[in-house]
Image (cartoon, rainbow, N blue to C red):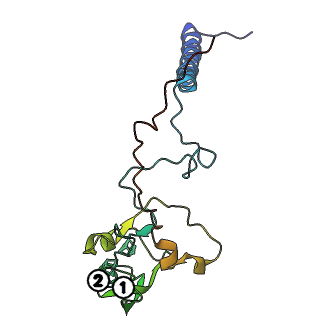
Amino acid sequence: MLHFSKQTIYTEHMSIIRDIAGIAKGMSVTFREMFAPTVVENYPDGPGPMKGAVFQERFRGLHVLQRDENGLEKCVACFLCAAACPSNCIYIEAAENTEENRISGAERYAEVYNIDYNRCIFCGYCVEACPTDAITHGHGFELATFNASNLVYRKEQLLAPIKPMRTEAPVESTSQLKEPAQDHP
Ligand code: SF4
Ligand code: SF4
């Protein structure tokens, strides 16, 4: 016949109570999180061009080569960005603007402007070095590819699109203003 001392029974009871308390504590966390608002982003099934991804303004993504208000390229091929780049991943070939072929507002423009994203560390030094604010960081981030040569982005891929010129909406004369709709019986 087995004999258990009072001390053994007490220890076993305490152990069971501790286990139940542990499970209850864990389940309380589970239930709390089940009813908390969702904070994850619904990428890539979310709305908009970023497919649900949300970025802080300071996020450094793919570069954008900017244009001025006349649609001309802001880059003047000064090479300062390439000199500042610690990864040596910017390649530029400069060319002269002519009256027949004006690409930038200055004497020169970048005929070739490549960034090798195999090497870029998104440090932003090129952006800081640029005297004309020609290069900025955008929010593009979908760079993954099976072919490393696809990661060498050319100027045509980096250039900001030309904005359509703003046209003033013609002012309607008072005679053209529509009469308020009349209710017909
Ligand atoms: S972000 Fe940094 S590493 Fe990338 S191109 Fe600019 S300077 Fe080079
Ligand atoms: S992007 Fe800016 S720093 Fe780089 S070559 Fe053009 S003007 Fe110079």
**Residue nearest the observer in this picture, 93 or 142:** 93
Amino acid beneath label 2: Ala
Measure how far apart labels 1 and 2 are at the Cα level: 7 Å
Query: Where residue 149 sits in the image (x, y, percent)?
Result: 59, 81
Q: Secondary structure at mark 1?
A: strand
* Mark 2 burial class by Cα count in 10 Å: few <14, some 14-19, many 20+: some
Residue on which disc 1 sits: 109
Q: Which residue is mark 2?
A: 106
Residue in the foreground of this view, choosing between 156 and 1: 156
Q: Residue at x 49, y 27 (%)?
A: 179
Is the residue 5 above or below the residue 178 in the image?
Answer: above
Q: Quadrant of the C terminus?
A: top right
Residue at image coords 38%, 92%: 95
Q: Are the two marked residues, 1 and 2, in contact with CB atoms closer than 8 angstroms?
A: yes
Q: Residue furthest front?
A: 175
Q: Position of residue 107 (x, y in %)?
A: 29, 88
Name the one closer to the observer, 24 or 34. 34
Name the outermost residue toward the top.
6
